[in-house]
Image (spheres, rainbow, N blue to C red):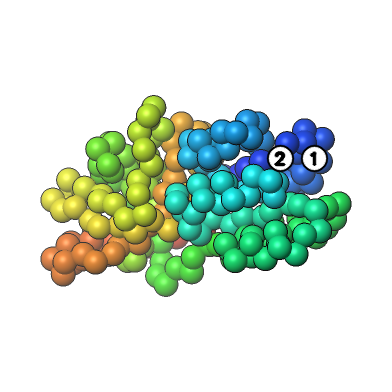
């Protein structure tokens, strides 16, 4: 089973988007266009993606929306040669590429940004299918490590995404875990009506931590072959 990182493209130019999509597809990425410039913030809140490519004219609004949702999502800003705009983008943690955009440089920039945004795991990840409740939504844990988990949360109409720190109720353990969100990603086609969230345990009591470690240690040690981090 393969994973294709999703790249959101916010550009007023259809031709530019088509070129970017053609560059991304052979590299194993899935590009999609945010088509309504004056609603780019709403679209960014409603859709799952792993990297944003945005026109400099929309950058300020888009960066604010992305950073509120997930501070670690990489952003690439496309614009004309403009030192001030480049400085502003860089200050917000984005990469600024000037037009005309070179294909090789663009693909390299996207690839490096995706790689660098993936957190380093300190222990083995194990497969798990554990029923949980996240933000009132019945969900499930997909895999676990001693530090955290990957959650599969169904897409629920009008339901807000989990905040940067949220509770995961685990009926099996009889505890609620305090989890800090690390990343958001789209699952494979087979589970397209859901979103994956990666998170690490954060500021839990010793009793809750021990309950979690007991669950992780009890699971078989086979490594997960599907990896998005």
Name the residue nearer the viewer: 138 or 103: 103
Relative height, residue 145 to residue 1 (above, below): below
Question: Which residue lies at the image location 59% right of the left edge and 50% below the top edge?
Answer: 60
At horizontal 45% and vertical 68% (from top left) the residue drawn is 121
Quadrant in the rendering for residue 153: top left
Q: Is residue 97 visible?
A: yes
Per the image, the residue denoted by label 2 is: 11
Please identify the quarter of the rendering in which residue 20 is found.
Answer: top right
User: Compared to 88, does 185 lie above or below?
Assistant: above
Q: Position of residue 148 (x, y in %)?
A: 34, 61
In this rendering, position of residue 115 left or right of residue 157: right
Q: Which residue is mark 1?
A: 16
Q: Where residue 13 appears, x then y in whole percent?
A: 77, 36
Q: Residue furthest bottom?
A: 122
Contact (Cβ within 8 Å) of mark 1 with mark 2: yes
Mark yes or no: residue 28 visible.
no
Q: Which mark is residue 116?
A: none
Q: Who comes first in sequence, dot 1 or dot 2?
A: 2
Could you tell me which secondary element the residue under label 2 belongs to?
loop
CA gap, disc 1 and disc 2: 7 Å
């Amino acid at each position: 089973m393969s994973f294709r990182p999703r790249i959101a493209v916010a550009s007023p130019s259809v031709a530019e988007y088509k070129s970017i999509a053609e560059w991304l597809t052979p590299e194993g990425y899935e590009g999609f266009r945010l088509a309504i410039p004056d609603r780019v913030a709403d679209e960014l809140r409603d859709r799952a993606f792993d990297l944003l490519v945005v026109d400099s004219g929309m950058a300020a609004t888009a960066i604010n929306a992305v950073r509120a949702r997930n501070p670690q999502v990489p952003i690439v800003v496309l614009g004309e040669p403009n030192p001030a705009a480049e400085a502003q983008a860089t200050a917000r943690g984005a990469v600024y590429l000037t037009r005309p955009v070179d294909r090789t440089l663009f693909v390299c920039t996207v690839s490096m940004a995706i790689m660098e945004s993936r957190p380093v795991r300190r222990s083995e990840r194990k497969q798990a299918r554990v029923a949980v409740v996240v933000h009132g939504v019945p969900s499930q844990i997909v895999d676990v490590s001693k530090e955290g988990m990957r959650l599969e949360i169904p897409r629920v109409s009008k339901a807000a995404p989990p905040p940067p720190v949220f509770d995961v109720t685990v009926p099996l353990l009889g505890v609620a875990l305090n989890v800090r969100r690390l990343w958001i990603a789209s699952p494979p086609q087979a589970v397209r009506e859901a979103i994956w969230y990666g998170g690490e345990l954060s500021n839990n009591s010793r009793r809750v931590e021990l309950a979690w470690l007991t669950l992780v240690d009890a699971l078989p040690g086979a490594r997960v072959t599907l990896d998005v981090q």
